[in-house]
Image (tube, rainbow, N blue to C red):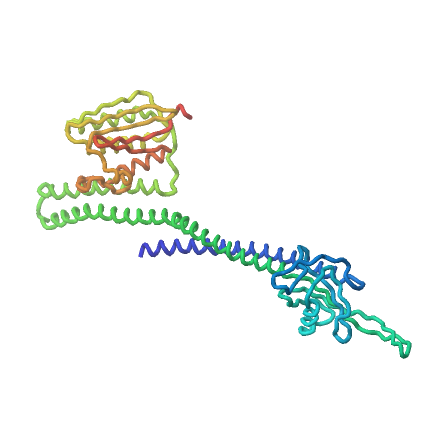
Amino acid sequence: MKKHMFKKLRNKFLLLNMVIISVVMLASFSVIYTITYARVQSENYSMLNSTASVTGSGPLFLIEPEETEDGGMIGRTKNVLFFNITLDDTGDICDVQSPFAFRGDLYLEAREAFVTSNPKIPGTFTLSFAGMEWLCKSSLVVGRVEILDFGVLRPIAYTKIAFVDITASRQNLVHLTFTFLVSGSVMLFVIFGISLFFANRAVAPVERAWNRQQQFLADASHELKTPLSVISANTDALLANRTETVESQEKWISYISAETDRMSKLVCDLLFLARSDGSQVKSEILPFDLSAEVSDVILSMEAVAFEKGIVISQNIPAGFSALGNDANARKVVSILMDNAIKYTPPNGSIYVRLYEVKHHVIFSIENTCDGIPKENLKNIFNRFYRAEQSRVHDGSFGLGLSIAKAAVEDMDGKITVKNDNKSVTFTFVLRSCKGR
């Protein structure tokens, strides 16, 4: 169900993107084709009008023809082919005007095509003959012929037809359309692949956020379920012994109190993370003495480390001030110290260091241990994550490092972890007051 939901979302992004791109491409190609078509038509009609406006009789000039393979059309040059024919009142050719020397029955084919199509006169139309397309324009010409028997002049109506070869221009438009179709199809195919790639990348953060939210809810519910079960069981035990004194029921009450404290801590941690995720105003960034905060935390935890036989070495120069929030800094140092003591084996060691590099104050804490598997490092700051599943019931919730990361980022800092087979080192960086 979940995969189907995100696949559907991705497909919507993809479909919307392809529709927009297709419309833009179609509009662009349409504009280009319309402009090209208008230009070609303008040139053809201009040539047709020039041809039709020629007066007189016979060829104006001669261009030597070029033989074609089929022999049907002779006389094509780099110029556009054009000519005029004049038909008398019986429909026979009585005059030809052409700058080309055509051989064969081209003029007869032109006449036959004209008579067969029976177009309106005068008018403009297209004809097909001799394997080519022609743009034509017909007009009426009235002449006088002397009749010898009576010595009078009789008017005769002639039909003058101008022909311009538009085969090449039509083919160019067809080729242009074919080019648009092929190039458009290839472009859409390529764009589809690119769009699919970016659609997957766009949906991936949403899917990760959804998964994290679902995992967060599941983990929070699980963590709250355990103390609630303990409280419920101990409450039932108290109710089963109503006549007993409070002192005799102290064991059950202490269990309830401990689980209540545990739940309170969990709720406080969840509220802190919720505020860090929301659009809450960030903590005010102010100068504070980081050296003092680190020293205080180490001092408060020396007894716990001593009980486990852990040696704490430190290099904490006095007077290192950073920009941030002292409460957040103390929280981060406490979490990292507590984490180091918890996972350092007995008789191990912890090394705490504070130093400055290029207007930044850097805190690092290294503890001896077996290290963290590399596959777990990417999840180390995730909520409710525990590198060792055997510590699920050690009293922690797996929120400490998540809170530490949120607190450091709230101070515009950065926290990282480095791991080898003998130790683990956590480091966080804050801006130094000297770098302001």
- Quadrant in which residue 368 is drawn: top left
- Residue at the top extreme of this rendering: 318
> 3 and 133: which one is in front?
133
> 148 and 229: which one is in front?
148
Q: Quadrant of the C terminus?
A: top left
Q: Position of residue 3 (x, y in %)?
A: 32, 54
For residue 68, above or below residue 117 = above
Number of numbered labels in the structure image? 0
> 49 and 272: which one is in front?
49
Residue 180 in view, yes or no: yes
For residue 167, above or below residue 351 = below
Q: Quadrant of the N terminus?
A: bottom left
Classify residue 250 as left or right of residue 263. left
> 326 and 57: which one is in front?
57
- Quadrant in which residue 257 is drawn: top left
Q: Position of residue 220 (x, y in %)?
A: 25, 46
Classify residue 170 as left or right of residue 252. right
- Residue at the bottom extreme of this rendering: 149
Q: Position of residue 405 (x, y in %)?
A: 31, 36
For residue 271, above or below residue 307 = below
Classify residue 155 as left or right of residue 13. right
Give the residue at x 29% y 49%.
Answer: 214
Q: Position of residue 401 (x, y in %)?
A: 27, 37
Give the residue at x 36% y 48%.
Answer: 204
Residue 331 in view, yes or no: no
